[in-house]
Image (tube, rainbow, N blue to C red):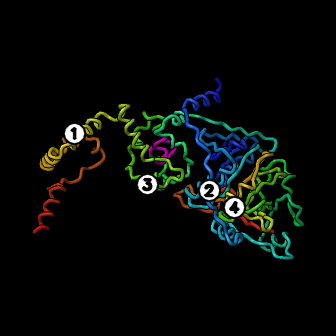
Amino acid sequence: MTGVNFAISETGGIVVCTNEGNADLGTSLPKLHIACMGIEKIIPKLEDLSIFTRLLARSATGQPITTYTTHYHAPVRDGEMHIVIVDNGRSEILANEKYIKSLQCIRCGACINTCPIYRRSGGYSYGYTIPGPIGSTLGASHDIKKNYTLPFACSLCASCTNICPVKVDLHEQLYLHRQDVVSAGLLGKTKHRALKIATFVMKYPFLMDLSGKIARKIVPMLPRSLIYSKYNIWGKNRELPKFPKKSFKELYKERQNELKK
Amino acid sequence: MNSKNSILESIKKAKLKPTPRPTLEIEHVEYENKDEQFSTVLKSVGGLASWIKSGESIENFIENNYDNLGTIATNLNLDITHIKINDIDDPHFLKDTDLSVIKGEFAVAENGAVWVREKNNKNRAIYFIARKLLILVPKGEIVDSMHEAYKRIDFKDGGFGTFISGPSKTADIEQALVIVAHGAIECKVLFV
């Protein structure tokens, strides 16, 4: 059994790209080859492969082409070849303008290799089968209830969007998914309330300054059991930083005054 | 409704706007010396390109370039002890092949790949199971880029074809490219 990198509408064949030769050997010895692919793998013409075969390896490992780029239009001698085409939620993405570009993905891995988060944590640490920024948007599209945390595990730095060879608007999709998570009521109540309060406070600079001042005075005096109560989800596995005496704004003003002198 | 129709129905429901097929109007790369470019790139992906010298036979080349060879498998009529790939019924018997001598149609200068499409070969496993590959390409059969390559390829009569660029490798672990995985450990391209 293999996956499929590209399926060619014009010729009715499939292309599997590997560096190892594992898929190639695996399809050459047995009599039966079953290839599974999503509907978005289909490209119109054979000549279009000239673009895609160049893009794929260059964007993945920086190689000029994968070691093996194998074109299947028939089974092995006396054998059988079956191509299974699945939808599995893709047509829903196709109908959704916000996420349609995620179907352009050629699975090169450039986004995961550039992502400051996935570069550190590796492939499967976030639970969805497809790793990386593209997996975070596809996972959320596929089952937002199960994967609602994925769009938040992102700093929106846009490195993935900049590097994507097929121009998937990755960080923008993750930003939109966050809004879907909130509208679907999937964000935890505590986090939802905390964000509501924060929004209110940040709307009024005076309130923001005041609450900062109070927090800097009071929080260091509070007992640990109160600060790290069950409502402080952030503090579950993390220590709060030491509270400074003055805010950035106060320090900045002081400095400006000093410079004037 | 069968699953094919239900997929097609839901695609129709997406109401996609028809988009014209984009045309490619870019100048593709061209090399002054295609042979040199091919040789350089193939070397960078772990392979080796050679040109047969005048008076040298393929048999001479094999004798001079390989030591302690065991089984050689090929469909060519070589004057050297070998097994015929097409005489083997079960491709698993090819597993002890040390060197496989195959024919490539043309080489691609930009990426060190060779297009292999031997329509009469009965065991495609030989491309991936042999320890070492020797691909014979006719001298001068070399194109600049994949854009030119696909102009030379068609699948009107179906079948199988593969681009091979150097020996097998893997980058699955820590994104570091390591040469030698499931396929050949060595890949030489000989222009004859």
Residue B188 visible in the displayed image: yes
B89 in magenta: no
In whole angstroms, how far apart are the C-alphas of marks 3 and 1? 31 Å
Per the rendering, the mark at residue B25 is 2
Residue B32 position, x and y percent, is 68, 72
Chain to which the residue tagged by mark 1 belongs: A
The type of residue carrying mark 1 is Phe
Q: Residue at x 18, y 43 (%)?
A: A204
Using the image, determine if residue A138 lies above or below residue A245. above
Give the farthest residue toward the bottom. Answer: B54
Give the farthest residue toward the left. Answer: A261
The quadrant of the picture occupied by the N terminus of chain A is top right
Chain to which the residue tagged by mark 4 belongs: B
In whole angstroms, how far apart are the C-alphas of marks 3 and 2? 28 Å
The 10 Å Cα crowd at callout 2, few under 14, some 14 to 19, many 20 or more, is few
The 10 Å Cα crowd at callout 3, few under 14, some 14 to 19, many 20 or more, is some
Label pair 1/2, CB-CB below 8 angstroms: no
Chain to which the residue tagged by mark 3 belongs: A
Residue A213 position, x and y percent, is 13, 49
The 10 Å Cα crowd at callout 4, few under 14, some 14 to 19, many 20 or more, is many
Highlighted range, magenta:
A126-139
A128 in magenta: yes
Q: Residue at x 72, y 41 (%)?
A: A12
* Number of the front mark, 3 or 2: 2
Instruction: Please name the predominant secondary structure of the magenta segment in the image.
Output: helix
Query: Which residue matches tag 4?
Result: B113
Q: Residue at x 14, y 59 (%)?
A: A253
Per the rendering, the mark at residue A200 is 1
Per the rendering, the mark at residue A159 is 3
